[in-house]
Amino acid sequence: MDKFLELLTQMNLFDLVTVISWGVAGAISFYFSIGNARVWTSISIGFFLIFLSQAYGINPWTHYQKLTAYHYIVGAAAIMTITHGFLEYYVFCRTFEMSGNKLIYRKTHV
């Protein structure tokens, strides 16, 4: 218990608030993805990956080089996943319904 309290006193408050905020953003995004399109699922996975990447800041072993590589790799994967989700959302809004059913608009000339 003493080691845990010592760890809390050494922790940066800004990093802790950032990690908690990304966790809440991931939870809210996951809540929207339940029963909805797969678009929100990829966005929420990206938010959770950012949460994991930012949790690196509150890790007491941040000087360990393999954890630094983990931080950058997970952050890059999160950015790609969120970008994929937003692009997929854009495509579905332009060409499909959110349920995935294709809408075909035909213009008939009279």
Image: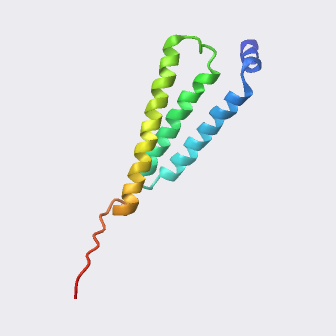
Name the quadrant containing residue 55: top right
Q: Residue 104: where, in percent of width, then height?
A: 27, 70
Residue at 46% x, 50% y is 40
Q: Residue 67: where, in percent of width, then height?
A: 52, 16
Frontmost residue, 47 versus 107: 107
Farthest bottom residue in view = 110
Q: Residue 65: where, in percent of width, then height?
A: 51, 11
Does 80 appear above or below 16? Answer: below
User: According to the image, what is the colour scheme of the structure?
Assistant: rainbow
Frontmost residue, 83 versus 50: 83
Does 85 appear above or below 77? Answer: below
Q: How many marks?
A: 0
Quarter of the image that includes the N terminus: top right
- Residue 89 located left or right of residue 10: left
Q: Residue 26: where, in percent of width, then height?
A: 55, 41
- Residue 36 located left or right of residue 22: left
- Residue 28 located left or right of residue 86: right
Residue at 52% x, 52% y is 32
Q: In the rendered image, is residue 38 in sight?
A: no
Q: In the rendered image, is residue 80 in sight?
A: yes
Residue at 49% x, 24% y is 72
Name the quadrant containing residue 36: bottom left
Quarter of the image that includes the C terminus: bottom left
Name the quadrant containing residue 11: top right
